[in-house]
Each structure stands twice: as structure tokens, then as C-alpha cells.
Image (tube, grey):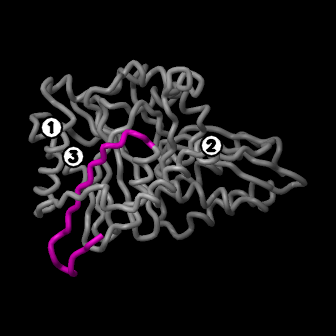
Amino acid sequence: MRGTSPGGPTNLVVIRTAHTSPYENLGLEQYLTGQAAPGQCILYLWQNRPTVVIGRNQNVWAECRPEAMEEDGVLLARRLSGGGAVYHDLGNLNFTFIARSALYSVPRHLEVILKALSLLGIPGEISGRNDLTVRGRKFSGNAFYRSGDFCCHHGTLLVDADLTAMSRYLSVSKEKLASKGVASVPARVVNLKTLAPDLTIDGLCQALIQAFGQVYGASPREISEEDLPSEELSRLAENLSSSSWLYGRKIPFNSRAAGRFPWGNAELLFVVNEGRIQQVQFFSDAMDQEWVHRMEEALPGCPWSKKALAEALAALSQTQQPGSLRTHMAKDLTQLINTCFADDFS
């Protein structure tokens, strides 16, 4: 897509899709992420029919209720980012910000969201690692991923979503709810329409586009899906709807460890044979999915011992500053493994 000259104004692009298929919409998002030009920021607005969307490395059976979903015709989708499972329907508006790393700024993106709400008379605020709230109740969750220099930040905006359905299809652990200080999913979230009864999806879209221009100091240019390559988008949608992507690989694990930490949950499955790790599967809603994937690739072949695993995990975060998120993740996982497998280790 067309960019700008160095030092010039930011080239703002807006795309709003009429599709409600999660596979088409996530496929378009994946395509756009790889197309952002230098100096360009893309705002993509989209909606899904009733769907549960889980993070890249989440365990389907632990995060949602597939049987109930199938019974009611609710779709399952898996995104490229981390974070927790979310429920989408046509009472929910999804947003995506896409830019190269030099222009990518999550605080600036959140400023766009909060300014749009302010234009509508709704006082939102940032809460925790990835939530937006009104008076302590969540109306938006956010997640992130990168592919080289290309960056993507996406999230949900609850306008008039079916909160009862959200509880029926999401399987949120008691530990996670307790960490948020609530007893159930509906107790934690709020629809924006309860705060602004006249709010519509179209009205929120217009406010977001207006705020986008105000925050970046430029006029957004809207483009049509008709200008995008339909064959490539169809291929991406097909991949994202495949069983192998949705349900992931299964390994015949013989050792398991699970726990919850400030950075997210962790479920580690190991295939151990003759004193060495043969395969690893790491389920997590951690935001740093790149590190999760690197760990899955790095541990096979490692001796099944406290020292070897501690060294391998430390090596995965050795380029990070002390106290960084990856350093904390490595230490937490080392302690988890040592605690769960105390009798197995040499």
C-alpha cells in the first residue's frame, strides 16, 4: 500500500469490511499486516457472527466449550496473537491497528479508542496489561503480534454483545476470575450501550475514524475490499478455518505442568524418553507468543534434569534486561517445572 516520504505526514488508511466470517476477517487482517508501508498506519474495523476466538497457543478444550458451540452454531476461530479467549457477535465491534515498528505505538492506538469514546460522552480508561474499562468494568480486551517489522494490535469493543452467550461458551478458570476480583465473566464486563443507549455500531465506527485522524493529525483515507487480491484472501481464510490450525497438533505427552502467573496461564506438555525431551507443547494466553513458540522449538533434545531445563530457559531470555517479562517468564516456568516434576528429575 502507498506510503509517505520520510518525515512526511502519516498516511492513514481505514478499511471496514462487511463480511462476518471470522476466517475471512482474520485472513484480511493477516494480509494487511504484511502490506503496511513505511509511514502508514491502518485502522481496520470488522465484525464476526457468533464466534469464540482463542489465542495462538491456547488449549481449545481449556478455554471454551466446543460442544455447546457446535450445538448452537457458534464458530471457533484462532488468531495469531496471544491473550485470552473472547466471544464475538454482531453486538461487538473489532478494531485492528497495523503499522511498521517505527510508527507502531500501542499507547497512541489506545488514545484513539479513548478519544472516540470521549466524543460519544463515555469516560473510558486503561486497566491492567491489556484492558479498557469504564468505571472498573471491561469493555475492551487487546492483543498483539509481530511478523518481522510488521506489527498488529487488535481488540474488541463491546457495544451490545450477548453477555449470557459469552458465559455459555467461554470456559474461564476460577483462578483467572479471582485474579480479576470477580466471580463470573458478566460481572467483569459491560456493554457500552448501557452507558450510551443511543450508541450504534455505525456511530462508533465514525467516532473511531474521526479520533484516528485527530490523534495522528492527518485525514484518513478509506479503501475498499474490492481493491484487494481476492484469491490470496481466500487462501488465508481457508488456512485459518482448517482443523489443523483451529485445534492444533496433539502430542502423546507423559509429563504435564500447569500454573497461573501475572503474565498469564501456562500448561506445559512434555514427551520424555530415555532421559531427554522429545517434544514440547506450551499452551498459554501470554502476550509474548513469539517467546512461547521459541520455547517449544528450543527444548526438544534437552536432558530431563533441573539444571539442563533451567539453563535452557535462561538462554531463551539471555538477551533481555534483568527484570524483563521474558526473564520473569523463564524463572516462573523453571520453578513450576521443578515443583511439578520434583520426583522425576535427576
Disc 3 to disc 1, C-alpha distance: 13 Å
Residue 98 point in image, percent of width and height? 33, 60
> In the figure, is residue 248 to the left or right of 277?
left
Q: Which residue position is annotated with label 3?
A: 113
Q: Nearer the viewer, mark 3 or mark 1?
A: 1
Q: Could you tell me which secondary element the residue under label 2 belongs to?
A: helix
Q: Could you tell me which secondary element the residue under label 1 belongs to?
A: helix
Q: Quadrant of residue 205?
A: top left
Q: Which residue position is annotated with label 2?
A: 243
> In the figure, is residue 82 to the left or right of 105?
right
> Looking at numbered disc 2 in the image, what kind of residue is underneath it?
Ser
Which residue sits furthest bottom? 6
Earlier in the chain: of badge 2 and badge 1, it is 1
Span colored in magenta: 1-22
Q: Tell which of 310 and 82 is nearer to you.
A: 82
Q: Nearer the viewer, mark 3 or mark 2?
A: 2
> Looking at numbered disc 1 in the image, what kind of residue is underneath it?
Gly
Q: Quadrant of residue 254?
A: top right
> Looking at numbered disc 3 in the image, what kind of residue is underneath it?
Ile
